Image: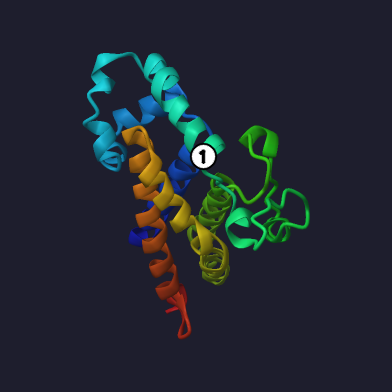
Amino acid sequence: MNEILTKQIARINLYALISRVLMKEVDESLLEAIERDEVILSFFPNYMQWEKRSEMEKKELKERFLDVDFSNLFVLHLIPYESFYRRDDQMLETGGENPVVQIYNTYDFRVQLEKARAVGPDHIGIELEFMYKLADSEYKALESGDRAAACEIARIQRDFLKEHILEWAPMFLQNIRAEAGTPLYYDAASLALEFLLNDYEYLAGLVGEKGCGYEG
């Protein structure tokens, strides 16, 4: 069980990290958190070797390069919303009719669009935050010994990845990689893409047709 909990903590931390980086501009405290943890920094190999990190303070790096890149990628040039990729008319669904809102409501996940600085609930950062909350709930169920609940939450995560995130996010993340002007966002997109594909494989194996691995 300790090994399962350790893996679950790693999943929680990765969802928290990528949802935050893709949600809104980084701040100095987040950059410091990334740089002081060797494991986290290893997820950003190009950023780690970026010469501008040693040439200027984090505040200047953020304002001159990272904030500009974020705006270009997430506001000006690319659209980080599921409905844009999945609707035939490429219109954003910003209200309660958005299919993900119904899922959020079912599991009592409240979207704070103003805090997230998003115009719709299907922003990639919000969908990843939803996965983070589910992974955290799964951990708590495992920790309390409720394996049936943990299995059900794992199934919810698998289905949300399959039916929503993986239907559009890989294309968006590949576009981020192609358009990124800084190593941070190139690495963040690479990390998110690899992690999401691997996590779906893990969840599909855990809660497959033969039952749930927690109950074995």
| Residue at the far front in the pictured view | 89
Q: Residue at x 31, y 29 (%)?
A: 35
Circle 1 crowding by C-alpha within 10 Å: few under 14, some 14–19, many from 20 = few
Q: Nearer the viewer, residue 14 or 76?
A: 76
Residue 3, position as x, y percentages in the image = 33, 60
Q: Using the image, determine if residue 111 lies above or below residue 8.
A: above
For the residue marked with disc 1, what is the amino acid?
His
Residue 106, position as x, y percentages in the image = 72, 61
Quadrant (top left, top right, bottom left, bottom right) of the C terminus: bottom left
Q: In the rendered view, does 102 fall on the left or right side of 38?
A: right
| Residue at the far bottom in the pictured view | 210
The residue tagged 1 is: 77
Q: Which of 138 and 32 is in front in this view?
A: 32
Q: In the rendered view, does 13 fall on the left or right side of 118?
A: left
Q: Using the image, determine if residue 60 lies above or below residue 65.
A: above
Residue 144 appears in view? no
Q: Which of 176 and 203 is in front in this view?
A: 176
Residue 72, position as x, y percentages in the image = 49, 33
Q: In the rendered view, does 204 fall on the left or right side of 96?
A: left
| Residue at the far right in the pictured view | 96
Q: Which residue is drawn at 41% across and 53% down?
A: 11
Residue 12, position as x, y percentages in the image = 45, 50
Residue 60 appears in view? yes
Q: Using the image, determine if residue 54 lies above or below residue 46.
A: above
The image shows a total of numbered marks equal to: 1
Indicate the colouring scheme. rainbow
Q: Which residue is drawn at 44% across and 41% down?
A: 17
Quadrant (top left, top right, bottom left, bottom right) of the N terminus: bottom left
Q: Which residue is drawn at 48% across and 38% down?
A: 73
Q: In which quarter of the image is residue 198?
A: bottom left
**SS type, badge 1:** helix
